[in-house]
C-alpha cells in the first residue's frame, strides 16, 4: 500500500516537474500563448494532487509506526511481567531476568 502510494507520488512529481520545466523554458510557448491562467491551474491541480497523495502516504507510515511501537511496548511489558512472576515463583533468578531482558 505504501509502495503503491510512493509510486503514484513519484509519477505525479515527474509530471509536475515536466509541466514546470515546460513553463520555465517556454518550450510550449506557442501552444500556451494566451492560456497562461489555464497552465497555472493545470500546474496547481497537479501539485495539489501530489501533496494529497504524499500526505496520505505519510499518515499510513505514521499509523504503521505507532502500531509497531504499541506492539513492541506491549511485548516488553508482558516479558517483564512474566519474569517477575517467575522470580516470585522461584523458577527464575534476578540475574536470569536481566539476561533475558
Image (cartoon, helix red, strand yellow):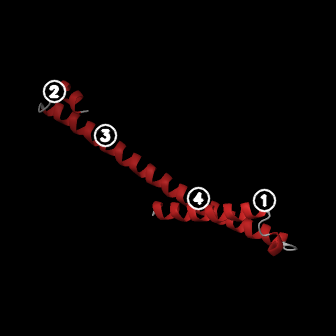
- Camera-side mark, 2 or 1: 1
Q: Position of residue 38 (x, y in %)?
A: 80, 73
Task: Pick whichever of labels 2 and 3 is earlier in the sequence.
Answer: 3
Q: Position of residue 31 (x, y in %)?
A: 80, 75
**Figure check: 99 above or below 11:** above
Task: Pick whichever of labels 1 and 4 is earlier in the sequence.
Answer: 1
Name the secondary structure under disc 1: helix
- Camera-side mark, 4 or 2: 4
**Figure check: 36 above or below 70:** below
Query: Which is more toward the observer, 72 or 92?
Result: 72
Mark 4 and mark 3 in contact? Answer it, CB < 8 Å: no
Residue sitting at the far left: 91
Q: Which residue is mark 3?
A: 76
Q: Position of residue 16 (x, y in %)?
A: 67, 63
The residue sitting at 77% across, 63% down in the picture is: 23
Task: Pick whichever of labels 2 and 1 is earlier in the sequence.
Answer: 1
Task: Pick whichever of labels 4 and 2 is earlier in the sequence.
Answer: 4
**Figure check: 93 above or below 63:** above
The residue sitting at 17% across, 31% down in the picture is: 87
Q: CA distance from mark 2 to mark 3?
A: 18 Å
Q: Which residue is mark 1?
A: 24
Mark 1 surroundings within 10 Å by alpha-carbon count, few (fewer than 14), some (14 through 19), many (20 or more): few
Disc number placed over residue 54 in the picture, else none: 4
Query: Which is more toward the observer, 6 or 33?
Result: 33
Q: CA distance from mark 2 to mark 1?
A: 72 Å
Q: CA distance from mark 3 to mark 1?
A: 55 Å
Mark 2 surroundings within 10 Å by alpha-carbon count, few (fewer than 14), some (14 through 19), many (20 or more): some
Q: CA distance from mark 4 to mark 3?
A: 33 Å
| Quadrant, the C terminus | top left
Name the secondary structure under disc 3: helix
- Camera-side mark, 4 or 3: 4
Amino acid at each position: 500500500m505504501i509502495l503503491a502510494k510512493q509510486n503514484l507520488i513519484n509519477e505525479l512529481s515527474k509530471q509536475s516537474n515536466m509541466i514546470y520545466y515546460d513553463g520555465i523554458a517556454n518550450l510550449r510557448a506557442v501552444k500556451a500563448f494566451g492560456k497562461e491562467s489555464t497552465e497555472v491551474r493545470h500546474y496547481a491541480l497537479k501539485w495539489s494532487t501530489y501533496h494529497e497523495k504524499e500526505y496520505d502516504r505519510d499518515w499510513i507510515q505514521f499509523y504503521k509506526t505507532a502500531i509497531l511501537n504499541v506492539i513492541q511496548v506491549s511485548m516488553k511489558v508482558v516479558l517483564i511481567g512474566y519474569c517477575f512472576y517467575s522470580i516470585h515463583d522461584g523458577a527464575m533468578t534476578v540475574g536470569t531476568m536481566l539476561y533475558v531482558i
